[in-house]
Image (tube, rainbow, N blue to C red):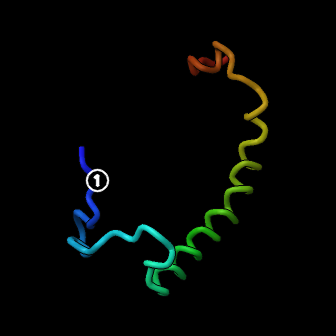
Amino acid sequence: MSVSRSVEGGVLLGMRKVETVEQMPGEYRQVVMKLLYALASTEFASVEQHQPGINQAPTSRSSRGSTP
């Protein structure tokens, strides 16, 4: 299986793929940084939301979905 150096679909079909930060247009770089910032900002809240269930394993009863 070979790796293509160009975009294989969508509106950028045929355009050379960006492989380094230096090749990325400034506008793209700004959008990527905003997306990364948003993801990083929400990741902590996501972990905190699931904290009560993270530290306890499900029981055989809870995994079957039965009620007591």
Badge 1 marks a residue whose secondary structure is loop
Q: What residue is rendered at 57% in x and 21% in y? A: 65
Instruction: Classify residue 28 as left or right of residue 52.
Output: left
Q: Residue furthest top?
A: 60
Q: What residue is rendered at 28% in x and 63% in y? A: 5
Q: Position of residue 53 (x, y in %)?
A: 73, 34
Q: Amino acid at mark 1?
A: Val
Q: What residue is rendered at 61% in x and 63% in y? A: 39
Name the residue carrying label 1: 3
Q: Looking at the picture, does residue 27 appear above or below residue 5?
A: below
Q: Position of residue 18 (x, y in %)?
A: 39, 71
Location of residue 64 (image quadrant): top right
Q: What residue is rendered at 24% in x and 43% in y? A: 1
**Most foreground residue, 23 or 28:** 23
Instruction: Classify residue 14 as left or right of residue 46.
Output: left
Label count reads 1
Q: Position of residue 23 (x, y in %)?
A: 43, 78
**Most foreground residue, 2 or 11:** 2
Instruction: Classify residue 1 as left or right of residue 33.
Output: left
Location of residue 17 (image quadrant): bottom left
Quadrant showing the C terminus: top right
